[in-house]
Image: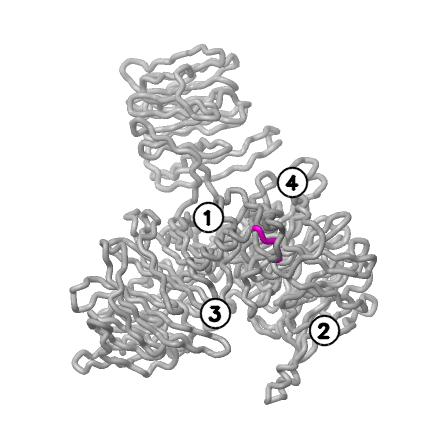
């Protein structure tokens, strides 16, 4: 068996991010030219490093570069050397190396400036890379591990202005955990780094646990002496044990320096030799007393005369923090509720952003009520599938390509997403037409017009002309011939229009004059190609006629050419002045490619060329056909059936078009009902209120609008934090759950529901809320021997499930539902209590298999409950997945991978005949064939477990394509060459990364192979020569296998 591994959808969840000017464009020049911000955002998504830039006009984020580093990115930081106009990017990863990257805007790639090795590879707690801090002046950086090790590097530049880096300076302290690391503003004094640490040496030596309970976190300051080239612990001070995050306070002329220490429920200001200043973090009024408030992200915003901080809590609330200070002395720390958005992994304030709205000063009460956005406005967001809880591939819409159904998100941001290969669009307008059209064009009145003036729609025997203005309406005075269908409509020259129809060419001048060219004899025009100055038509019989526009604006016939047969396709590309070319082909297209050409100023011939979008078609006879795609600045005009549609493309470069169906709670699992093509989803959340309770709480909140922000009476005035609404928010819905999250309930409480939905209409046909603190954990469809009820739905639930301080459960249940109303609704037949959590359910030979804790049990349907038939108690941990095929049962254990079982009907016994020799923490499983199971573990590994042939009862043909030896040989050698010639960007060894937990075997890394197009041309040719192929053949091979997978 050989496998080809290829990522279809890259990771979308952001691990960390940093903002900076990595392109190095001068900000003042950019502002003068009106190009807006030059700041970019570097985002780490697993092993992918993305570089994003906000659009200066719309504010939407545009991806400049996305590169797979083949390593786990743990941290990012940016710095700028004194006198340099661009920022460098520092990457901490699991490679055991510190990598400094420089972005090259000319080549649109990251160049590796320095790579410093300091430890072993892998995510070890004693290998630095998890924490990064850079001196604000760019003179030094500190990279730290979670335990013990800290290394400091001195940064400088040589005479040629190249970055130089010193040997590492050690700042080790054994038996010490590091929670957060930052650098202080020290001007041009020695750099100082601050860290939250916890020493555990005494806790290890104390078997009673008393020392562990008394362990104290400390705030430690490390100073780098640039003169002595030495790092020393300058000070250590005890801090609150809830401290988890450090935020640097501006210093010098901007502020008092020091750090903000974010603790559980508090924010502290600390600096060497300065007394502690404390402020309480405001709490939501409905937050249970047992829950604290923890800061998870922070940003600093600096202006010429002031600065402030934005801190976000784990509930999504953002607080504005400012300091009252005189010189280096801080007298007061103020915290004010700012706004609420969804929880982030990193938050930044762009330096070019408009000044944020100031909130009034004064005492901030301890309690507050979230409100609609007041100080922030959402400009753009990038959709994320994180986390994907479950996935199925099925063709429920009878389309050419199957759809991917994924259960994504958690809490109020939970969705069921339908993924189709293609681009997402937003429909701007839709108008029904009197018949089904055959073509559509948009055209300007003159070349200097900013917008198109007409939409021309061609039907089988007529042409419809629509005028574009504030509304789109039909016109009759456009001079276009409307009694026949049109073959082409375009702008000619500077200000004249052309319509080509089967019987001739209609040339409409700016002054209204119309020139007609008629076809000779009984011939008709079949194909046409044109640009702004040239027209080529093909007549029936295979005759080509070429026209040019002369200096007076007349369209003149220049030349004729007879072809050997009828012309199938015809196009003429736009060419510079003095050059003309015609392309005529007579074959059907094999493949299509959209290619966007950026605008250029002052090319090789001194001419300026506008941006264009071209459609390239590869024809069966080997000819490349290219044509210009007619687009407008606001969208694309298209016809679909008998409708005229205007739409915009959301994001170019995406692999899938997503359709979202919102869910109530976090989706756990779902099944597809194939006959009715419905989907059954189970959802559950811990520590939350039910939907009815949330609505009642919102109603009470609205009724209490006469109370002030802290709950005290305010003479009937509206609540301060409840009087504003985000644009587009519905009246009476001032607290959208997607933005603010659900109100928090007691931690031991569960809410759960079962949903039946129709993916075609995206409507929920049935929604059942579970009661008695039950949470749905597993689901399957089952057909029992008793055909009375037909297909039934089995749902496993857990009651009172708790994970801390130890795992406990009040009981488990298996619910059996029957489908009513043609599968649109559910009706409970009965539920059966079990002693453990039933995490796995599956149909098997007219009965129900259930994994109840570590027991595999077979049930039959009874009148009042399920009837236990037999069981096997020999599984070691917890059963999480069950698959069946013929008489075999494939059981996935939470910690022990797969077990292969059989059911002996004559003995009514389940027995295990094979298991995986390697223990794995199983997170997903899929049956492949009679002997093979595919699994994924919690460390990110995908593996295949196959039963040896001498043990298997039956051997079937391998369906994975492993016998295609030619492809295996080609891609294996391509992977080998890329492994040698193109090492990963962050210094991680590729094979070591893929084999971090278990050695890779018989799997070709498609992601590495797809790095080939990004190589320099000479390196592409070198690798192609080694493989006895051309670069074009290799690119075609990569494209073919990707298309085969999609």
Q: In front: 463, or 761?
A: 761
Q: Residue at x 67, y 73 (%)?
A: 197
Mark 4 or mark 2, which is nearer to you? Answer: 4
Q: Is residue 991 above or below residue 588?
A: below
Q: Which mark is residue 362?
A: none
708 is within the stretch colored magenta: yes
244 left or right of 740 in image: right
Circle 2 packing at 10 Å, graded few (<14), some (14-19), many (20+), is: some
Cα separation between marks 4 and 2:
42 Å
- Is residue 89 visible in the rendered structure shown here? no
Q: In front: 970, or 1045?
A: 1045
Residue behind mark 1: 654
Cα separation between marks 3 and 2:
31 Å
Residue behind mark 4: 36
Instruction: State the image coordinates of residue 164 (x, y, percent, origin top left).
Output: 73, 60
Cα separation between marks 4 and 3:
42 Å
Residue behind mark 2: 171
Give the mark nearest the N terminus, 1 or 3.
1
Q: Are marks 4 and 3 in contact (CB under 8 Å)?
A: no
Mark 4 or mark 1, which is nearer to you? Answer: 4
Residue behind mark 3: 939
Cα separation between marks 1 and 3:
27 Å
User: What segment is highlighted magenta in the picture?
Assistant: 706-710
**Element type where label 1 sits in the image:** loop
């Amino acid at each position: 068996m050989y496998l080809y591994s290829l990522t279809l959808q890259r990771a979308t969840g952001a691990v960390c991010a940093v903002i900076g000017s990595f392109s190095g464009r001068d900000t003042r020049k950019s502002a003068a030219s009106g190009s807006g911000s030059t700041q970019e955002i570097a985002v780490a998504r697993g092993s992918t490093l993305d570089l994003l830039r906000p659009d200066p006009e719309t504010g939407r984020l545009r991806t400049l570069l996305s590169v797979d580093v083949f390593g786990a990115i743990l941290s990012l930081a940016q710095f700028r050397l004194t006198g340099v106009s661009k920022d460098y990017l520092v990457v901490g990863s699991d490679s055991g190396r510190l990598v400094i990257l420089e972005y090259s805007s000319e080549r649109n790639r990251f160049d590796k400036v320095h790579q410093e090795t300091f430890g072993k590879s892998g995510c070890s707690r004693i290998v630095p890379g998890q924490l990064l801090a850079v001196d604000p002046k760019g003179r030094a950086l500190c990279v730290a591990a979670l335990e013990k090790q800290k290394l400091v590097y001195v940064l400088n530049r040589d005479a040629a202005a190249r970055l130089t880096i010193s040997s590492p300076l050690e700042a080790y302290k054994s038996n010490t955990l590091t929670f957060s690391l930052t650098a202080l503003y020290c001007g041009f004094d020695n750099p100082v780094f601050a860290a939250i640490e916890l020493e555990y040496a005494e806790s290890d030596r104390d078997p009673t646990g008393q020392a562990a309970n008394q362990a104290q976190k400390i705030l430690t300051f490390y100073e780098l002496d640039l003169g002595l080239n030495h790092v020393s612990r300058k000070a250590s001070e005890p801090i609150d044990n809830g401290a988890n995050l450090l935020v640097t306070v501006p210093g010098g002329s901007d502020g008092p320096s020091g750090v903000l220490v974010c603790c559980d429920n508090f924010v502290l200001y600390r600096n060497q030799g300065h007394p502690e200043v404390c402020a309480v973090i405001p709490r939501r009024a409905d937050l249970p007393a047992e829950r604290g408030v923890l800061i998870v992200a922070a940003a600093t915003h600096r202006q010429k005369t002031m600065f402030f901080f934005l801190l976000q809590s784990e509930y999504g609330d953002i607080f504005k923090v400012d300091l009252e200070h005189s010189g280096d002395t801080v007298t007061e720390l103020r915290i004010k509720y700012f706004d609420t958005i969804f929880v982030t992994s990193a938050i930044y304030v762009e330096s070019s952003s408009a000044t944020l709205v100031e909130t009034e000063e004064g005492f901030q009460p301890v309690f507050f009520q979230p409100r609609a956005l007041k100080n922030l406005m959402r400009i753009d967001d990038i959709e994320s599938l994180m986390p994907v809880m479950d996935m199925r591939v099925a063709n429920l819409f009878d389309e050419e390509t199957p759809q991917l159904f994924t259960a994504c998100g958690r809490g109020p941001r939970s969705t069921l997403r339908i993924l189709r290969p293609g681009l997402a669009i937003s429909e701007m307008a839709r108008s029904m037409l009197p018949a089904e059209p055959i073509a559509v064009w948009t055209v300007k009145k003159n070349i200097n017009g900013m917008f198109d003036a007409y939409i021309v729609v061609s039907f089988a025997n007529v042409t419809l002309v629509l005028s574009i203005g504030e509304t789109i309406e039909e016109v009759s005075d456009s001079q276009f011939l409307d009694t026949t269908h049109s073959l082409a409509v375009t702008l000619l020259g500077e200000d004249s229009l052309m319509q080509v129809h089967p019987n001739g060419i209609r040339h409409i001048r700016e002054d209204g004059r119309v020139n007609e060219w008629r076809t000779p004899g009984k011939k008709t025009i079949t194909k046409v190609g044109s640009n702004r100055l040239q027209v080529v038509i093909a007549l029936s019989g295979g005759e080509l006629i070429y026209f040019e526009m002369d200096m007076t604006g007349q369209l003149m016939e220049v030349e004729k050419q007879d072809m050997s047969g009828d012309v199938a396709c015809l196009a003429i590309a736009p060419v510079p002045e003095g050059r003309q070319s015609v392309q005529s082909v007579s074959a059907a297209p094999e493949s299509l490619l959209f290619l966007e050409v950026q605008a250029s100023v002052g090319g090789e011939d001194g001419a300026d060329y506008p941006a264009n979008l071209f459609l390239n078609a590869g024809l069966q006879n080997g000819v490349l056909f290219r044509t210009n795609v007619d687009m407008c600045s606001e969208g694309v005009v298209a016809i679909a059936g008998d409708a005229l549609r205007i739409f915009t493309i959301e994001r170019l470069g995406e692999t899938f078009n997503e359709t979202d169906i919102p869910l109530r709670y976090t989706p756990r699992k779902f099944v597809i009902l194939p006959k009715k093509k419905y989907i059954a989803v189970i959802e559950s959340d811990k520590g939350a209120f039910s939907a009815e309770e949330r609505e009642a709480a919102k109603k009470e909140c609205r009724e209490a609008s006469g109370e002030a922000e802290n709950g005290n009476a305010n003479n009937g005035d509206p609540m301060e934090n409840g009087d504003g609404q985000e644009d587009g928010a519905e009246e009476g819905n001032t607290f959208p759950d997607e933005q603010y999250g659900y109100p928090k309930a007691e931690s031991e409480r569960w809410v759960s529901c079962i949903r039946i939905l129709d993916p075609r209409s995206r409507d929920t046909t049935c929604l059942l809320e579970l009661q008695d603190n039950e949470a749905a954990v597993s689901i399957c469809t089952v057909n029992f021997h008793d055909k009375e009820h037909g297909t039934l739905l089995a749902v496993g639930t857990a009651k009172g499930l708790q994970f801390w301080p130890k795992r406990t459960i009040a009981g488990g249940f298996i619910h059996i539902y029957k489908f009513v109303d043609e599968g649109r609704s559910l009706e409970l037949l009965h539920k059966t209590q079990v002693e453990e959590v039933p995490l796995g359910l599956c149909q098997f030979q007219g009965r129900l298999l259930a994994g109840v804790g570590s027991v595999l049990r077979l049930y039959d349907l009874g009148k009042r409950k399920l009837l236990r038939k037999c069981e096997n108690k020999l599984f070691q941990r917890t059963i999480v997945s069950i698959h069946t095929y013929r008489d075999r049962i494939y059981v996935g254990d939470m910690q022990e991978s797969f077990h292969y079982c059989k059911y002996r009907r004559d003995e009514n016994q389940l027995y295990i005949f094979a298991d995986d020799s390697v223990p794995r923490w199983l997170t997903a499983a899929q049956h492949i064939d009679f002997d093979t199971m595919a699994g994924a573990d919690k460390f990110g590994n995908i593996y295949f477990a196959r039963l040896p042939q001498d043990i298997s009862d039956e051997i079937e043909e391998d369906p994975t394509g492993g016998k295609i030896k030619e492809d295996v040989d080609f891609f294996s050698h391509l992977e080998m060459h890329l492994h040698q010639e193109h090492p990963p960007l962050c210094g991680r060894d590729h094979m070591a990364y893929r084999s971090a937990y278990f050695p890779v075997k018989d799997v070709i890394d498609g992601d590495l192979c797809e790095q080939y197009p990004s190589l320099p041309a000479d390196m592409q040719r070198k690798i192609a020569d080694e493989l006895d192929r051309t670069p074009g053949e290799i690119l075609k091979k990569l494209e073919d296998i990707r298309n085969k997978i999609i």
